[in-house]
Every structure is written in C-alpha cells, then in structure tokens.
Image (spheres, rainbow, N blue to C red):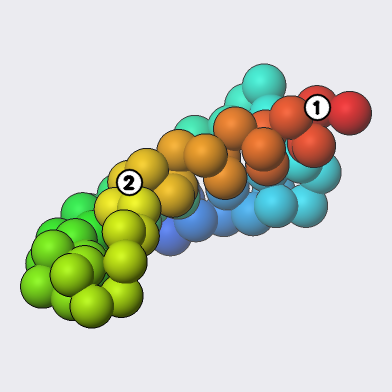
C-alpha cells in the first residue's frame, strides 16, 4: 500500500508538478479522500453561518471554478 502511494506521488511530481504535463495528469494520491472530508466540513460551515455571512459557494463549486481556470492557464 505504501509503495503504491509513493509511486503515485512520484508520478504526480515527475509529470504534472515538474513539467505541467496536463495530458498525463492523474489526481494526487489520497487527495480525493482528503478533499471529500474538507468539503463536508466546509459545506457544514457554509450552511451554519450562511445566514450571517451571506451566500458563500460550497467547496466543490469553488474548486470546479478554479480547476477550469487552472487547466486553461496550464494549457497556454
């Protein structure tokens, strides 16, 4: 398990991080699970404090918007 994680991290570093090779892009190992946890917590806070703070986008909405922007910048 640890070796698979290490290989995934190294692949991400060597292709996407180092060379911004979008064609070979794979998600960062274990980041998807971490994002789901963060999104649950963030969305809970948005729902609880929304009436006082005004409407804020949920984390997945925010991430989708910025993912498109980032991918467009990397392709140029």
Q: Position of residue 10 (x, y in %)?
A: 57, 54
Residue where numbered disc 2 is placed: 60
Q: CA distance from mark 1 to mark 2?
A: 22 Å
10 Å crowding of disc 1: few (<14), some (14-19), many (20+)? few
Task: Tell me which label, 1 or 2, sits earlier in the chain.
Answer: 2
Residue drawn at the location 89% of the way across and 28% of the way down:
76
**In the displayed structure, does residue 9 sit left or right of residue 13?**
left
Name the outermost residue toward the top. 23
Residue drawn at x 45%, y 38% is 64
Q: Quadrant of residue 69?
A: top right
Measuring from the top left, give residue 55's x and y in whole percent.
Answer: 31, 59
Q: Image height check: is 54 above or below 13?
A: below
Q: Secondary structure at mark 1?
A: helix
Residue 73 is left or right of residue 57, and the answer is right
Which is more toward the observer, 4 or 67? 67
Q: Residue at x 21, y 68 (%)?
A: 50
Q: Looking at the image, which residue is at 70% across and 52% down? A: 17
Residue located beneath label 1 in the image: 75
């Amino acid at each position: 398990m640890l070796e698979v994680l290490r290989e995934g991290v190294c692949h991400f570093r060597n292709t996407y991080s180092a060379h911004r090779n979008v064609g070979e892009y794979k998600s960062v190992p274990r980041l998807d699970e971490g994002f789901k946890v963060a999104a649950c917590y963030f969305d809970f806070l948005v729902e609880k404090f929304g009436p006082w703070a005004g409407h804020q986008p949920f984390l997945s909405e925010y991430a989708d918007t910025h993912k498109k922007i980032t991918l467009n910048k990397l392709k140029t």
